[in-house]
Amino acid sequence: MSIEEIFRDTLEAREVLSKAIHVTPLDFSATYSKMFKAKIFLKLENLQKTGSFKVRGAYYKIWSISKRERKGVVAASAGNHAQGVAFAATSQGIPSIIVMPETAPISKIEATRNYGAEVVLHGRVYDDALKKAMEIAEEKGYVFIHPFDDPKVIAGQGTILHEALEQLGEPPDTIITPIGGGGLASGLIVVARHLWGNKTRIIGVEPSYAPKFTESLRKGHPVEVPAHPGIMDGLVVKVPGELTFRIISKYIDDIVTVDDREVSEAIYMLLERNKTLAEGAGAAPLAALLTGRVKVGDGEKVLLIISGGNIDPTRLVRVVNYELGKGRRIVRLEGLIPDEPGSLNRVLGIIALARLNIIDIRHDRISPVLEPGWAKIEVYAEAPSEESVGNVLEKLNGEGFPFKLLRY
Ligand SMILES: Cc1ncc(COP(=O)(O)O)c(C=O)c1O
């Protein structure tokens, strides 16, 4: 299928989707715009139905299958594609079966069931689930919905750019998008290249631990790379699709990689500065900017695709704690105090004066490694600022309590 044909489908998809899912907000970020001397816009697909853009491609694909094939659909996924397909099928009155690996988180299984799909748990990893899904499609005569390597799915994803264009009023200079199997990036490329040729720079971001497009572009054909799970779970694909590789290799301007630490910071910043909850894949474009791996010029109009917000609460807690520790907003102090009544009280007084709020405290007087006459104190506390931590350490040491900051 040619780019022109897929482009035509993006127009049809726009019509179809307008009655079924949300037009997501386009948020101008004053913070990042100031930081990068550019005009930075966030397309908030985390606020899309089902929590990610994936429903666009799934809905349009299912809408496009012929009457004869509308017996049912089947997909394999432990992530956003599962929820997208389940929602899209149910709202079009079609049964769906989603095969998930047995290791899939309960929250994802429940969400998919709640959208009306029958969930089949099979195998330990995605590839096992995929095989099973193919078997079910064959057995039951259901249509298999590919997560990215399908022109209709690509056209559905491309509708994001039609929408953003209407919201922006003019084409962006740069688009930064996450890349998993490449369906999203291909959809954006189709629309941008068809409407404005090479005027808009398109940059893909993939995890350093699943760099399938980086490697495939280097080799000139799709190659399989080793990959492991991580925060950007939506982007962990081992090998690009055939169609997505053809489109991306021909038209993308650049691909960069980011790692989980960099993405963790981006998730935290989106939360703190923009009040936006993004999952790892969705925060990857901001990470590419923050790390300087993507450079933007003065006044450049940049569109970041915040592609999804389905992050597990337990993972979110870890990200927030890690970032609070890194920014010295949660600290761990360790020190010695004379082993006599009242010294702990004096230390706590100094800590309280600096407005540190204690989360947990350990007081050790009996460990055999302690010199007699001393007790060891370990304090976890929330700090109002980085300076307050420096001040409290100075004060404690000045008053004869040798304290230091430990790695959180
Ligand atoms: C939130 C999110 N962002 C980006 C992607 C990548 O999309 P694609 O596989 O079309 O490249 C996915 C894929 O599941 C996703 O869930």
Image (cartoon, grey):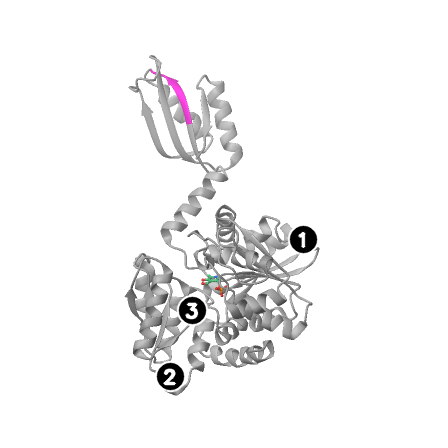
Ranked by sequence position, the earlier of labels 1 and 3 is: 1
Local SS, label 2? helix
Q: At x 64% / y 65%, what residue is drawn?
A: 172
Q: Is 194 positioned to the left or the right of 123 in the image?
A: right
Rate crowding at label 3 as few (under 14), some (14 to 19) or many (20 or more) other CA atoms within 10 Å: many
Q: Nearer the viewer, residue 272 or 17?
A: 17
Where residue 152 sits: x, y (%)? 49, 76
**Identity of the amino acid at label 3?**
Lys
Q: Nearer the viewer, residue 2 or 383?
A: 2
Indicate yes or no: mark 1 CB to ligand 1 under 8 Å: no
For label 2, the residue is 69
Ranked by sequence position, the earlier of labels 1 and 2 is: 1
Spatial CA span between label 2 and label 3:
25 Å
Q: At x 55% / y 68%, what residue is drawn?
A: 186
For label 1, the residue is 37
**Identity of the amino acid at label 1?**
Lys
- With respect to residue 143, does 316 lie above or below? above
Magenta part of the protein: which range?
Answer: 334-339
Residue 337 belongs to magenta span: yes
Rate crowding at label 2 as few (under 14), some (14 to 19) or many (20 or more) other CA atoms within 10 Å: few
Residue 25 appears in view: no
Local SS, label 3? helix
For label 3, the residue is 49
Indicate yes or no: mark 3 CB to ligand 1 under 8 Å: no
Ranked by sequence position, the earlier of labels 2 and 3 is: 3
Local SS, label 1? loop
- With respect to residue 190, does 388 lie above or below? above
